């Protein structure tokens, strides 16, 4: 196991270095932060001085080396826009994003799995066909359009749910949670559904396909022949064999959800990491952008590793491979 | 952020027996950068922080300068101003306000690393005469010190020292500050709590020195970046006020019985400028720069059908202008606010006279995220110039990408907006944009325009302490500019606020700064 983990860690470091490098390449085309940091009254001399103080006059390689050197020490610098420590900024925003992703993941499993099983078992019923059709819509509807639609219906017309924000949050150490107050729970509903809709349809279609596959196998036929009740067959035998890809996809999708939460966050003014990143892009706040990309890639890498480990734990056949580092979650 | 004195203030407030706390929920388009007014010289951030901190002087609702923390002032010599401070003013934590606080604040804001240094350009030093008298010395005779001081808010020296925040924050050195997340001013509202990107709460300062015109007990400030969400929040009653009502949604807002739209024009004037270097940047004319010929510039001016731009690109909300500064700006002159009439045939004839009967190609540099409806008006004007026989190429990208090109001079024509903030005086435009590049002047002179005659007028106006004389000098400079058609003025930008009917009175000035201490609720 230690060898496996070490290999993984080296992998992760390599991935993150590559991400940082690509990010820095992109920043060269984002534009000039100095112009946005000073107002109309600043003189040319002040502009030049600021450029030098930020180290923007140095070459690309120098800037990148400085960044990596500082980042290795855990120092991501301070934000150009509000002079706060970047890491603090991101860790303040992380709970909001994480809770939203948690709700979306829960919804996707709680709704996606039963719906998938139902559409697989009652393949020819009208409801299953209708669900199939709706799921195509769910995959193709962009989340910002969906979010606005939800706001119009549930906030403006019905006035049931808030259109923006997290409501009241409770501070638990450095973590802020919206689960403990009524307004906080209410505020999670619309963005949670918006973020999870694509995910629900994904899980549902995946479960359906896997179920249909499994239902045709021999051991299900034997189970039927043994006279087991349908429920035991569907949920005990068939579904258990479908969960493998669902675990994989859900695990890998959490990274995607965190990354793509930024659209939903922007629509609902959800004070999470995505919101922070979008604002950083507008202001060419390079330290924040760089740190965000590093953090998100770190999350991706961690999740990948966890999925690999879970795989090895669920399926004994893979353990041998995993140890030799040959397993890859796909 | 639990502070004993804040609780005391809240308790005192509870004792006054207010039946119900009047809370104004403010939905803004973006978050303020920080609670530290010296950390980011952005007009909007400063306008929000002005509810907490105050300067020695302030603008009234109609943009006149009036006393705030200073009661009166006089010039002792051409370069020394003496300020008599208001007595009996207390900071939110109870510390008394004295001359020491002014000195500490001026030292912090004028520090070489201070991001806000540019807002106090002429400052040299300050001296304490007694506990309530301060002398401020400037480098040279400088008529606009008061204008600058409206934006220099005063900190509590004791509080800065106690929290190790006497130095400004500095991105270059990675210096953060206590004042970034905490505030202690003298203003009408006290910061109660702050969650960046979510909500900042201000409560009424019962011990404010001024007689409150407002009746608000609490302000909940929330940034809502997505404009559709902001509109929805206003319609559903989750916010009472927004200082950025999206222009495309105004009809929708106006049709709601509970919402009132306040629409006017900003101080920001929008115009096109020309590259006046020897060679054009991207044109089929190689040997000379066509824009150096006044007939070409006039042709471009006459080819613009401003009414069509106003109606289509600006949704009928902009104010057409012939002047480069808005009416509220000192230096504005009504006789200069007359446009050349739209005259397509005249434009074609002028181009032919200048030797371009078949037009020529050139590049227009516009930004997709800077001015109001910039893409729309740039496209409209480019089409109009094409109709006059020219071949404009529109280059459109976000501001952050266009700025470096503009600074280098990589353009032929560019769109530009200037608000004259924070100075609120035409001198801002004249010295920063119009003046030829020299020393600190002409930072935005990206196209090498201007001449010695105009420069001389600007330099004179910069040291003239007699206001009527100074304004006459500026008007003269602006007149020369206009005669040479160095710029093509378009309009003053529209701006719109929207309130719910819970708000009965508010003051909207063309500097687009909400002043909630002048706002009354039901």
Image (cartoon, coloured by chain):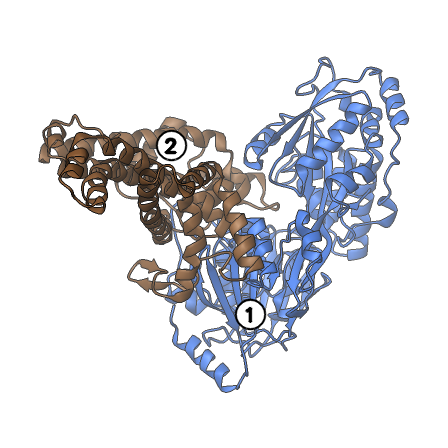
Q: Quadrant of the N terminus of chain B?
A: bottom left
Mark 2 packing: few (<14 Cα in 10 Å), some, or many (20+)? some
- Please tell me whether residue A103 is drawn above or below residue A248 in the rendered image: below
Please tell me in which quadrant of the rendered image residue B78 appears: bottom right
Q: Quadrant of the C terminus of chain B?
A: bottom right
Q: Residue at x 38, y 38 (%)?
A: A290
Residue annotated with mark 2: A63
Q: Which chain is brown?
A: A
The x, y position of residue B52, in whole percent, is 53, 66
The x, y position of residue B106, in whole percent, is 52, 59
Say left or right for B291 vs B88. right
- Please tell me whether residue B473 is drawn above or below residue A245 in the rendered image: below
Q: Colour of chain B?
A: blue
Element assignment for label 1:
loop
Return the chain for callout 1: B
| Label drawn at residue B187 | 1
The x, y position of residue B457, in whole percent, is 77, 42
Q: Using the rendered image of the protein, determine whether residue A148 is visible from the camera's viewpoint.
A: yes
The x, y position of residue A74, in whole percent, is 28, 43
Please tell me in which quadrant of the rendered image residue A59 appears: top left
| Label drawn at residue B226 | none
């Amino acid at each position: 196991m230690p060898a496996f983990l070490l290999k993984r860690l080296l992998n992760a470091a390599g991935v993150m270095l590559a991400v940082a490098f690509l990010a820095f390449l992109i920043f060269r085309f984002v534009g000039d932060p100095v112009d946005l940091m000073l107002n109309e009254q600043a003189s040319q001399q002040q502009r030049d001085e600021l450029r030098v103080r930020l180290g923007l006059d140095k070459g690309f390689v120098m800037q990148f080396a400085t960044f990596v050197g500082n980042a290795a020490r855990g120092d991501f610098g301070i934000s150009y826009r509000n002079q706060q420590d970047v890491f603090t900024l991101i860790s303040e925003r992380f709970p909001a994003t994480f809770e939203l992703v948690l709700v979306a993941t829960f919804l996707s499993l709680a709704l996606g799995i039963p719906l998938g099983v139902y559409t697989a078992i009652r393949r020819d019923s009208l409801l299953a066909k209708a669900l199939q059709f709706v799921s195509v819509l769910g995959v193709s509807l962009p989340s910002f359009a969906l979010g606005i639609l939800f706001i119009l219906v549930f906030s403006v017309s019905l006035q049931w749910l808030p259109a923006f924000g997290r409501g009241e949050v409770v501070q638990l150490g450095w973590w802020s949670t919206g689960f403990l107050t009524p307004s906080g729970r209410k505020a999670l509903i619309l963005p949670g559904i918006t973020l999870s809709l694509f995910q629900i349809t994904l899980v549902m279609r995946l479960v359906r396909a896997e179920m249909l596959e499994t239902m045709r196998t021999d051991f299900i036929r034997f189970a039927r022949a043994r006279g087991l009740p349908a429920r035991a067959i569907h949920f005990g035998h068939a579904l258990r064999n479908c969960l493998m890809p669902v675990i994989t996809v859900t695990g890998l999708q959490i990274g995607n959800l965190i990354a793509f939460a930024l659209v939903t966050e922007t629509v609902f003014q959800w004070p999470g990491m995505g919101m922070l990143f979008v604002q950083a892009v507008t202001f060419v706040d390079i330290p924040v952008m760089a740190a965000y990309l590093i953090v998100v890639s770190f999350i991706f890498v961690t999740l990948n590793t966890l999925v690999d480990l879970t795989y090895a734990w669920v399926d004994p056949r893979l353990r041998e491979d995993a140890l030799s580092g040959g397993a890859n979650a796909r | 952020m639990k502070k004993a004195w804040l609780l005391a203030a809240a308790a005192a407030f509870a004792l006054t027996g207010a039946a119900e706390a009047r809370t104004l929920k403010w939905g803004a388009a973006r978050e303020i950068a920080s609670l530290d007014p010296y950390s980011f010289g952005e007009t909007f951030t400063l306008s929000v922080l002005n509810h907490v901190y105050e300067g020695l002087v302030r603008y009234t609702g109609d943009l006149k300068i009036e006393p705030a923390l200073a009661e009166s002032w006089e010039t002792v010599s051409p370069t020394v101003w003496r300020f008599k401070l208001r007595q009996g003013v207390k900071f939110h934590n109870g510390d008394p306000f004295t001359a020491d606080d002014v000195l500490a604040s001026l030292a912090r804001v004028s520090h070489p690393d201070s991001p806000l240094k540019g807002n106090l350009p002429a400052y040299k030093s300050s001296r304490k005469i007694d506990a309530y008298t301060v002398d401020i010395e400037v480098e040279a005779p400088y008529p606009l010190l008061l204008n600058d001081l409206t934006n220099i808010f005063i900190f509590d020296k004791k509080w800065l020292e106690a929290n190790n925040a006497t130095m400004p924050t500095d991105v270059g050195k990675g210096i953060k500050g206590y004042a970034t997340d905490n505030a202690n001013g003298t203003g009408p509202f006290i910061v109660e709590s702050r969650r960046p990107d979510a909500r900042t709460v201000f409560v009424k300062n019962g011990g404010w020195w001024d007689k409150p015109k407002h009746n608000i007990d609490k302000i909940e400030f929330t940034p809502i970046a997505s404009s559709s969400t902001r509109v929805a929040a206003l319609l559903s009653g989750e916010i009472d006020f927004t200082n950025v009502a999206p222009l495309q949604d105004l009809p929708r807002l106006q049709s709601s019985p509970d919402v009132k739209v306040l629409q006017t024009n900003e101080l920001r004037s929008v115009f096109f400028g020309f590259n006046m270097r020897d060679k054009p940047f991207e044109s089929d004319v190689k040997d000379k720069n066509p824009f150096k010929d006044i007939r070409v510039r006039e042709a471009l001016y006459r080819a613009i059908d401003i009414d069509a731009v106003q109606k289509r690109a600006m949704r009928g909300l902009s104010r057409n202008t012939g002047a480069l500064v808005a009416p509220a700006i000192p230096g504005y002159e009504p006789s200069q606010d007359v446009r050349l009439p739209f005259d397509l045939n005249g434009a074609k004839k002028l181009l032919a006279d200048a030797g371009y009967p078949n037009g020529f190609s050139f590049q227009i540099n516009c930004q997709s995220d800077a001015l109001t409806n910039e893409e729309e008006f740039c496209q409209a004007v480019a089409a109009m110039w094409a109709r006059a026989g020219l071949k404009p190429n529109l280059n459109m990208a976000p501001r952050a990408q266009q700025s470096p090109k503009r600074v280098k001079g990589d353009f032929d024509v560019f769109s530009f907006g200037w608000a004259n903030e924070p100075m609120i005086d035409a001198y801002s435009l004249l010295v920063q944009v119009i003046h030829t590049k020299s020393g600190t002047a002409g930072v935005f002179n990206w196209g090498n325009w201007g001449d010695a005659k105009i420069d001389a007028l600007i330099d004179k106006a910069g040291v003239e302490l007699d206001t009527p004389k100074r304004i006459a000098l500026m008007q003269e400079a602006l007149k020369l500019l206009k005669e040479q058609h160095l710029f093509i003025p378009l309009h003053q930008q529209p701006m719109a606020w929207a309130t719910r009917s819970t708000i009965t009175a508010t003051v909207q000035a063309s500097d687009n700064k909400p002043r909630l201490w002048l706002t009354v609720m039901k």
